[in-house]
């Protein structure tokens, strides 16, 4: 959606927005990113099951953060999430 925000603003009759983007990345055993990913997946689990994407048993969300941490540390990986994009515009007063 972030890349389409200028078009959305224009469609709403707003001026071109000012925008910024930031992304969460992490590595090492103390990074909070593993818990963040597991928490996000936990929140999506009911919908994933409802549409038949995966079951709770398949996802094993209760152990996901530790499994991600173990693999990332062993492989010396950096995990990067998609960026968050913010946009705003000022309308003439």
Image (cartoon, grey):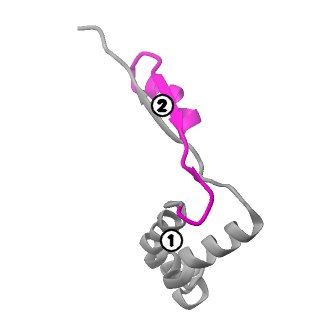
Q: Could you tell me how many numbered marks the image carries?
A: 2
Residue labelled with disc 1: 38
Queried whether the magenta region covers residue 26, the answer comes back as yes
Question: In the picture, residue 92 is in which quadrant?
Answer: top left
Q: Earlier in the sequence, mark 2 or mark 1?
A: 2
Q: Position of residue 2 (x, y in %)?
A: 54, 37
Q: Is residue 14 above or below residue 29?
A: above
Q: Residues within 10 Å of mark 1 (few under 14, many from 20)?
A: many
Q: Are marks 2 and 1 in contact (CB under 8 Å)?
A: no
Q: Residues within 10 Å of mark 2 (few under 14, many from 20)?
A: some
Circle 2 sits in a helix, a strand or a loop, which is it? helix
Circle 1 sits in a helix, a strand or a loop, which is it? helix
The span picked out in magenta is 1-30
Q: Position of residue 84 (x, y in %)?
A: 50, 42
Queried whether the magenta region covers residue 50, the answer comes back as no
Residue labelled with disc 2: 8
Question: In the picture, residue 74 is in which quadrant?
Answer: bottom right
Q: Position of residue 25 (x, y in %)?
A: 59, 50
Q: Residue at x 40, y 26 (%)?
A: 12
The image quadrant where one finds the N terminus is top right
């Amino acid at each position: 959606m972030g890349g389409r925000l200028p078009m959305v603003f224009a469609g709403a009759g707003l001026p071109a927005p000012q925008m910024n983007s930031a992304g969460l990345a992490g590595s090492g055993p103390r990074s909070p990113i593993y818990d963040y990913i597991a928490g996000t997946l936990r929140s999506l689990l009911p919908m994933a099951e409802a549409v038949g994407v995966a079951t709770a048993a398949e996802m094993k969300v209760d152990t996901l953060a530790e499994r991600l941490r173990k693999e990332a540390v062993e492989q010396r990986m950096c995990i990067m999430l998609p960026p968050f994009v913010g946009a705003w515009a000022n309308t003439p007063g």
